[in-house]
Amino acid sequence: MADWMYLENILLPKNLNFMLLQTTSLTFAYPGQAPISFPDISLAGGEALLLLGQSGSGKTTLLNLLSGLLTPSQGSVMLDGVNLSALKGHRLDLFRGQHIGIVFQKPHLITALSVKQNLELAQFFGKKKGLSPSDLLQDLGLAVKATAAVGTLSEGEAQRVSIARALVNSPKLILADEPTSSLDDLHAQRVVQLLKAQAAKIGAALVIVTHDQRVKSEVSQVLEVKSA
Amino acid sequence: MNLLTLSWKYLSFRPLSTGLNAILLAFGLAIITVLLLVQHQFEQKMTRDAAGIDLVVGAKGSPLQLILASVYHIDFPTGNIKMEEAQRISRNRLVKQVIPLAMGDNMQGFRIVGTNHDYLSLYEVSFAAGKAWEFPFEVTLGATAAQALGLKLGDSFIGSHGISVGSHDHDQQQFKVTGILAPTGKVVDRLVLTSIESVWYTHDEQGEESIATEEVELPLEEGTSLEEEAHDAHAEAMDPLKVPVAAQGFPSTNQEREVTSLLVRYRNPMAAIQLPRMINSATSMQAASPAFEMSRLFELLGVGISLLQGLAIALVVIAGLSIFIALYNSLKERKYDLAILRTLGASRLQLVTLVFLEGISLTTLGALLGIALGHGFLAIIVELTAQEVVSMVDPWIFLPEEGLIFGYALAVGMLASLIPAWSAYQTSIAKQLTKT
C-alpha cells in the first residue's frame, strides 16, 4: 500500500514519480479567434526546455498559461502535482509568487527600489524565505550593486538582477520570455547559461520562450511552437 | 519590505510631485488649523476674561469698543466718565460690586491700568513675587508683562502716555514694581496694574504741584489713638504719595476726578433688565454687556471665518483633485509595474491597498505639514503682535479637534485613491505584459 502525503492541499501517493511540469492537451482561445493548441510539455526538476517560434505563434500565450496568468480553455498545467487551473484568486497569485519565477524580455525592475529591495519585494509577495538576496547577488556578481538604484545599472546588470528576482524564492519553475532578444551574442549566451546553471542549482524546471535562434544550441530540449 | 514601505518608496521616488501635492494640501489644512486654534481660544479666553463681569459702564460711544477696551484691553477707551457719576452707580441698589478702571498709559505697549484690589480678586490671581500695590506709583505686573519687560521686584520704570507704543514719556514720576503675578492665562497677564491714584497723578497737568494739593482720607490703623491718627493724617495729607491708596471702592479726593470705566456685578437678575436701560437713558454714560457684545462680535467675525473656511475647504478639494490626478497618472505610468507585482505574487487586494496607502500616506504627510504650518504661522503672528489681540492665542496648544484634520486628510486620500485603486484592481496582468 502506498503512503500518502498532502501537497498544496491535494492528497497524493508518496511514491508517485511525476514530472515537475506537465501540460496536457493545452488549448487557449482569445475572444473571437480560433483556439490555439499547444504540444504537451513534460519537464523534470533541473531540466530546461527551449520554446522556439515566430512572432504571433503563441509562445507568450503558452508562457502565460504555464505561469497561470491565463486559464486554458482546455487541458491542464500541473506544476509539482498542482493543477494551476484549480487555483483561483489570491491562492493562484501566492502559488505563482512562491513557485514560479519569471524573467521578462526587458528587466522591468521596480525603479523606486534598490537592487536588493527588488529581491526582497519578491520574497514579501511570495511570503517565502527562499534564497538570501545578498548571497544570490553575490553569486551573480552583483554584490557591489546591492544598494544601487536600478536606474544606474547597465542593461546586462539589470537583466541579471531580474534573473535574481526570479530565483530568490527558489521557484519550481522558471519561465524566461525572450530574455536574450535585446542582448548581443556574448551576453545572450551568458544569460542563457546563467539561467540554466541557477535552475539546475535549485532543481527548478526552466522554460525559455524565444524566437532567438542563437540560443538554440544552448538547450538540449527544443520545442517549436507553430501557429495554426 | 512591506506595502507601506513600498508606497513610501514610490512617493519618495517622485519628490517634486509628492512635495507639491503635500504642500498644496498642507496650505488648506494650515488655514483650517489656524481658524480652529483662533476660534477656539478666542471664545474660551474671551469668555474666561469676562467671567464675573455683568456690565461695563463707560463714556458714550461704541459699546463693543467699551467692552474691548475695558475687559480685554485691546481697543481704545471711549473716553472718561466723571467719578461722581460713577460713584452714584456703585450706590445703586441693583449693583453688588463696582470695580473702577483708569487707563491711558502704557509701558512699552503693555497697558497701565489703574484699579483697586477687587480687580485682582476678580481674576483670582496669585502672586509669583511681592504683593499688591499699596501706595501711589507702586505697580503689580502681570506674568507676561513682567517677562516681556524684564522687570523684577524693586525695579522702577517710566510710563508712556497713550495705550500704544510711541507716545511721550511721563517722566515726572517713576513706577516701582512691588508685585509680580503668577501666570493665569487671562487678560491680567498682559497688564501693568496700579492704583487709580497713580493714573490720576501721572496725568495731572501741573505735575507734582497738583499732587500736593490733593487731600486724602487716611485709613485708621489698629492700635493708634484718634489723636495720633489725626496728627499723622494732617502731616501726610501734605504728601499724597505717602498715603495708602484705596484697596476697595473709589479713591477719596477733593478734586473733580474721572475714571475710564466701571466693571459692574449685578446684585440680582432683575438688574440685567433695569440697570443698562437706566444708565443709557438717564446718565451721560453708556452701559454695555460683555456677553451680548461678544456674541455680536463672534457673529460678525463668523462671516469672515466662514469665508476663510470656504477658502480652506476649496484648497483641500483642489489638493484632493491634484492628488487624484497625480495618483492616476503615476498609476498609468506604472501599469507594467503593477503587472510585475502580480507576477511576483501580489494579489489584486494588495495592489488596491498599495494605491490607497500611497494616497493616504500623501495626505497624512500633508496633514502633518498643515498642522505644523498652522501652529508655526500662528506662532509667528503672535510673536510679531506681542501686545495685540492675537497675542491672547497660544499657538502651541494642540486641540482634540485637530484630530479631525487627520480625519479630513484621510478622507481626501481615500477619495482621491478610489478610481486609481479600482483601475489597479482591474489591471489584467497577461494583457499588460503582452503590451510591452
Image (tube, rainbow, N blue to C red):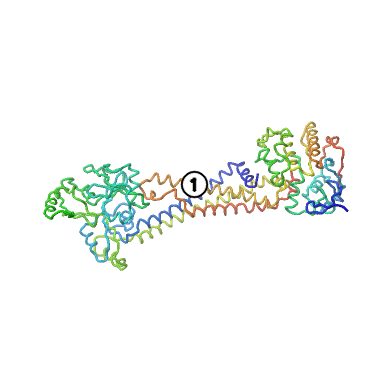
Residue type of the residue flagged with mark 1: Ala
Residue at 74% over, 34% down: A139
* Furthest residue toward bottom: B270
In front here: B247 or B354? B247
- Where is residue B168? Give x, y as percent: 26, 43
- Horizontally, is B111 left or right of A206 in the view? left
Let me know if residue B185 appears in the view.
Answer: yes
Decide which of B214, B160 is in the foreground and name it.
Answer: B214
Q: Position of residue B72 (x, y in %)?
A: 34, 53
Q: Residue at x 23, y 47 (%)?
A: B137
Dot 1 falls on which chain? B
Residue A192: image x %, image y %? 80, 36
Q: Quick check: B248 left or right of B1?
A: left
Disc 1 is placed on an element classified as helix
Using a 10 Å C-alpha cutoff, classify the residue at mark 1 as few (fewer than 14 neighbours), some (14 to 19) or many (20 or more).
Answer: some
Q: Which residue is mark 1?
A: B372
Residue B41 in which image quadrant: bottom left
Which of the pair B34/B101 is nearer the observer?
B101
In the image, residue B256 above or below residue B6: below
Furthest residue in direction top, as rendered: A186
User: Residue B309 location in percent, x, y?
Assistant: 48, 54
Which one is in front, A80 or B108?
A80
Mark count:
1
Residue at image location 65% in from the left, 51% down from the top: B353
Placement of B295 over or under B137, stated as above or below: below
Q: Is residue A34 visible?
A: no
Q: Is residue B10 left or right of residue B195?
A: right
